[in-house]
Image (tube, rainbow, N blue to C red):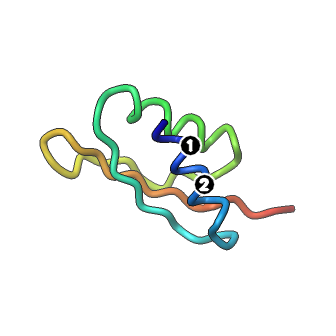
């Protein structure tokens, strides 16, 4: 479910904008960055923000 929300937000953004996403749990930390990359978005960083929360930065893909 987490990537669905991320994807909806990315769709509402302009090309090249950066989205900050906070993730909890092992599955979202693995699946959200992978799914975003598969759709062509750029993974800028994935870092531990708190004991059980990860901070993900994505740049929305640019159309060719």
- 25 lies left or right of 30: left
Q: Residues within 10 Å of mark 1 (few under 14, many from 20)?
A: few
Task: Identify the residue at horizontal 69%, vertical 59% (top origin).
Answer: 61
- Give the answer, above or below, for where 7 lies relative to 27: below
**Residue where numbered disc 1 is placed:** 4
Q: Name the secondary structure under disc 2.
A: helix
Q: Whole-percent x and y of residue 40?
A: 70, 48
Q: Whole-percent x and y of residue 62?
A: 74, 64
Give the CA separation, mark 1 to mark 2.
6 Å
- 15 lies left or right of 23: right
Task: Identify the residue at horizontal 63%, vertical 61% (top origin).
Answer: 60
- 58 lies left or right of 24: right
Q: Quadrant of residue 51?
A: top left
Q: Whole-percent x and y of residue 46?
A: 37, 47
- 19 lies left or right of 36: left
Q: Which of the labelled discs sits on residue 8, or is there none?
A: 2
């Amino acid at each position: 479910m987490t990537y669905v929300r991320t994807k909806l937000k990315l769709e509402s953004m302009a090309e090249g904008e950066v989205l900050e996403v906070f993730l909890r749990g092992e599955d979202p930390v693995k699946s959200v960055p992978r799914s975003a990359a598969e759709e062509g978005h750029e993974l800028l960083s994935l870092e531990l923000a708190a004991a059980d929360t990860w901070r993900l930065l994505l740049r929305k893909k640019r159309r060719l």
